[in-house]
Image (cartoon, grey):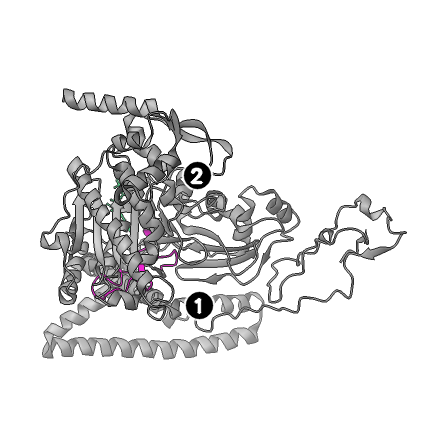
């Protein structure tokens, strides 16, 4: 190692050399050595009376930590039931297919073989003749003659005479025996003679076929996929256009290390690579397309990822045999049987290696986003089915697209609506108001419970079981939620209640889910997008939508749902369960399958005594025009107040009608006034502690004008 001297006054951070390879590493090339640092003028300065200290002192103790990774005793595919079953299924499938393919063609094979039989017979006669007459040794005998080697010639001649005698005898016996057998069969079992003769003809036909046109071709034409090798990985890394990687490759791969042998991992290969210093796994993830091109694989096969247990430069490259969207998914374990405890993880999909991936719905609020037709509604329905299979759960399903995608769940829903008409929105508002009251009731119940029963101030599975408290899980789903949030009359109220559900609901046993095909600030208000716990992002078109669903900076960190193709239906980035976001292909449950699952769920619910609301024909009380937001806003702004901040209006509204406006913020007021043409602007004012400042607010005259406009329109109608 190069010993660089720096002045003793230099900050310790200058000692920034990378450590040596970790123990157990498998260097592909010469292990990376610390690069020779460029000479700096620090080397020449001697500010401390000329005394310098070595940067890499020989006696610097190591951290004393050796990591070792045990390689599995049993290969990965045998440890997973799913993988082992997949392999067995593949073998049986292929055998059955081959049998079917050849079975159908048997008559053609027989006819073709019969056609070749004369040529086969001729070949048999010629080959037998050559064998009997020992023609293969003829060149040896001719050579002995040529060399005038009398002794060798005599030895070979004797050997030939002996062979011809023996082989002639064998041939004669075989001919006599064959003829005798044929005669016997002819006399005693003529049917069998036909069988043996046919077999003989087929055998002769087999002998008579040509090499370039065999009678029986392969049923399965195999194209061998190239094995993943270190060279291919390096070639692909070199193709992503990263300067640091290219420099390392130019030096023969110095600085790039394979920390473990490339192995089979599920239906694909896994390579663990240490990237050159300064290159992160995210740098490679960003260039997945180029990487796939370098690997000569389809994009859906190539899954680079960081290793959360390792440093930032560790890349785990998993290359599947087939694209994820073409790999047959295992059946959803709950499709045919089983119940759910929403407080525990439940399998809802598979990762690239087709291993189960679970989700825990309790204590989470959920956001699902994608462009249209990628599987967002299917995913939300799947999550609702999971909830339906917990007999304690109360389901509220609202589908604003109005196509009845949640229709299969009607018989287990406490509240259900499909549509975007005013009456549908009013139904939803009424249901949400019930939930708002329920939220308050639950908060009071939790507060009143002793610590011994409710130690964490949140609903537990045991509390949910206790029917006296009515703290069962409530799952409410709004698909195409932007339609509700943008509703002119009720949008603001819906947003306020939903934001409250997202913030306070999880601890109180209420899980709110929002799906949108237009993930932007309007469709997913910040209060919801910022506070959601579980996030599922199917294909989106750009960074804003990606980060709106997955969370801020996710795109930059390499978690990009833009990389999915349009055929990656049901495949999403999932964030919020586990440390790192992961890619999941959600289980495919279509409407008929959903109906079957719901039948099962309904039965269990009937036994548990939890079939309520919509499922038994009871609907919420109609949401009347209980309040007039515009008039209320005007009422809380005094006639002599020219302008007022939005937050002040929100606080005054909450005082005016706490049951309606509790939880409103400045943004809620802005959203509520916007449909009436009242826009927020900068308003100068004084804070409660007397400081003058500018905040967003409204002009009273604008509000009054909006009321007049609205009232005159009503009169005209
Ligand atoms: N998990 C899945 N696996 C495979 N295919 C799926 C999966 N989920 C959905 N699909 C396919 O994708 C299609 C679209 O699904 P879905 O209706 O859920 O899309 P969407 O994103 O909700 O669309 P929109 O926004 O228009 O409502 C479905 O018809 C289905 O065939």
Q: Is mark 1 on a helix, strand or loop?
A: helix
Residue 348 drawn in magenta: yes
> Which stretch is magenta?
326-354
Inspect this view and state whether residue 74 appears.
yes
Q: Which of marks 1 and 2 is in front?
A: 2
- Quarter location, residue 24: bottom right
- Quarter location, residue 469: bottom left
Question: Which numbered disc covers residue 543?
Answer: 2
Q: Name the residue under label 1.
A: 136
Of the pair 569 and 362, the residue shown nearer to us: 362
Of the pair 281 and 122, the residue shown nearer to us: 281
List the single residue furthest toward the right: 49
Of the pair 105 and 626, the residue shown nearer to us: 626
In the rendered structure, are the residues bearing label 1 and label 2 in contact, judged by CB atoms less than 8 Å apart?
no
Of the pair 517 and 296, the residue shown nearer to us: 517
Residue 36 in the image: state x and y as whole percent: 74, 50
């Amino acid at each position: 190692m190069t010993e660089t001297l720096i002045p003793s006054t230099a900050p310790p951070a200058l000692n920034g050399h990378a450590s040596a390879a970790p123990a157990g590493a498998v260097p592909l090339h010469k292990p990376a050595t610390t690069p020779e640092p460029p000479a700096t003028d620090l080397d020449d300065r001697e500010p401390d009376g000329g005394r310098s200290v070595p940067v890499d002192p020989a006696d610097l103790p190591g951290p004393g930590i050796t990591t070792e990774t045990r390689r599995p005793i049993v290969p990965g595919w045998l440890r997973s039931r799913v993988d082992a079953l997949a392999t067995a299924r593949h073998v049986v499938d292929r055998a059955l297919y081959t049998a079917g393919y050849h079975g159908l063609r048997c008559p053609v094979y027989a006819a073709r073989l019969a056609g070749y039989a004369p040529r086969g017979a001729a070949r048999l006669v010629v080959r037998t003749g050559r064998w009997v007459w020992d023609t293969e040794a003829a060149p040896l005998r001719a050579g002995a003659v040529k060399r005038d080697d009398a002794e060798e010639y005599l030895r070979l001649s004797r050997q030939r005479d002996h062979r011809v005698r023996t082989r002639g005898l064998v041939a004669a016996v075989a001919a006599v025996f064959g003829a005798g057998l044929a005669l016997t069969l002819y006399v005693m079992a003529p049917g069998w003679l036909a069988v043996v003769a046919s077999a003989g003809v087929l055998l002769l036909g087999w002998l008579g076929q040509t090499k370039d046109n065999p009678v029986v071709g392969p049923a399965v034409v195999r194209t061998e996929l190239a094995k993943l090798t270190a060279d291919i990985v390096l070639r692909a890394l070199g193709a992503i256009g990263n300067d640091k990687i290219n420099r390392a490759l130019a030096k023969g791969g110095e600085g790039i290390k394979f920390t473990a042998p490339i192995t089979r991992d599920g239906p694909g290969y896994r390579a663990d690579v240490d990237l050159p210093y300064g290159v992160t796994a995210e740098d490679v993830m960003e260039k997945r397309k180029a990487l796939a091109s370098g690997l000569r694989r389809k994009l859906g096969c190539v899954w680079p990822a960081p290793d959360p247990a390792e440093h930032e430069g560790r890349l785990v490259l998993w290359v599947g045999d087939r694209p994820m969207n073409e790999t047959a998914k295992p059946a959803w374990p709950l499709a045919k049987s089983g119940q759910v405890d929403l407080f525990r993880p439940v399998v809802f999909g598979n990762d690239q290696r087709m291993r189960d991936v679970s989700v825990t719905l309790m204590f989470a609020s959920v956001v699902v986003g994608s462009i249209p037709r990628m599987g967002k509604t299917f995913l939300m329905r799947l999550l609702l089915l999971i909830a339906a299979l917990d007999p304690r759960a109360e389901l509220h399903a609202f589908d604003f697209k109005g196509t009845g995608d949640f229709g299969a769940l009607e018989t287990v829903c406490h509240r259900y609506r499909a549509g975007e008409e005013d009456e549908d929105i009013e139904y939803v508002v009424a249901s949400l108001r019930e939930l708002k009251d329920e939220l308050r009731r639950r908060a009071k119940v939790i507060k009143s419970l002793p610590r011994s029963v409710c130690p964490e101030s949140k609903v537990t599975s045991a509390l949910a079981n206790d029917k006296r408290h009515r703290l069962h899980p409530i799952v409410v789903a709004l698909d195409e939620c932007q339609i509700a949030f943008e509703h002119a009359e009720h949008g603001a109220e819906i947003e306020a209640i939903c934001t409250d559900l997202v913030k306070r609901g999880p601890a109180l046993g209420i899980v709110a889910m929002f799906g949108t095909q237009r993930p932007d600030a309007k469709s997913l208000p910040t209060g919801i997008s910022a506070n959601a716990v579980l996030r599922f992002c199917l294909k989106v078109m750009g960074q804003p939508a990606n980060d709106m669903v997955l969370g801020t900076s996710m795109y930059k960190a390499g978690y990009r749902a833009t990389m999915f193709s349009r055929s990656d239906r049901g495949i999403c980035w999932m964030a919020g369960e586990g440390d790192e976001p992961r890619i999941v292909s959600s289980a495919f449950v279509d409407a008929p399958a959903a109906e079957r699952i719901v039948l099962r769920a309904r039965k269990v619910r009937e036994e548990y005594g939890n079939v309520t609301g919509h499922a038994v024909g009871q609907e919420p009380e109609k949401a009347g025009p209980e309040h007039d937001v515009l008039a209320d806003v005007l009422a809380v702004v005094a006639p002599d107040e020219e302008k007022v901040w939005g937050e002040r209006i929100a606080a005054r509204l909450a005082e005016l009608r706490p049951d309606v406006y509790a939880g409103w913020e400045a943004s809620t007021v802005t959203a509520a006034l916007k449909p009436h043409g009242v826009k927020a602007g900068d308003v100068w004012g004084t804070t409660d502690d007397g400081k003058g400042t500018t905040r967003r607010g409204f002009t009273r005259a604008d509000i009054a004008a909006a009321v007049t406009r609205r009232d005159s329109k009503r009169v005209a109608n």
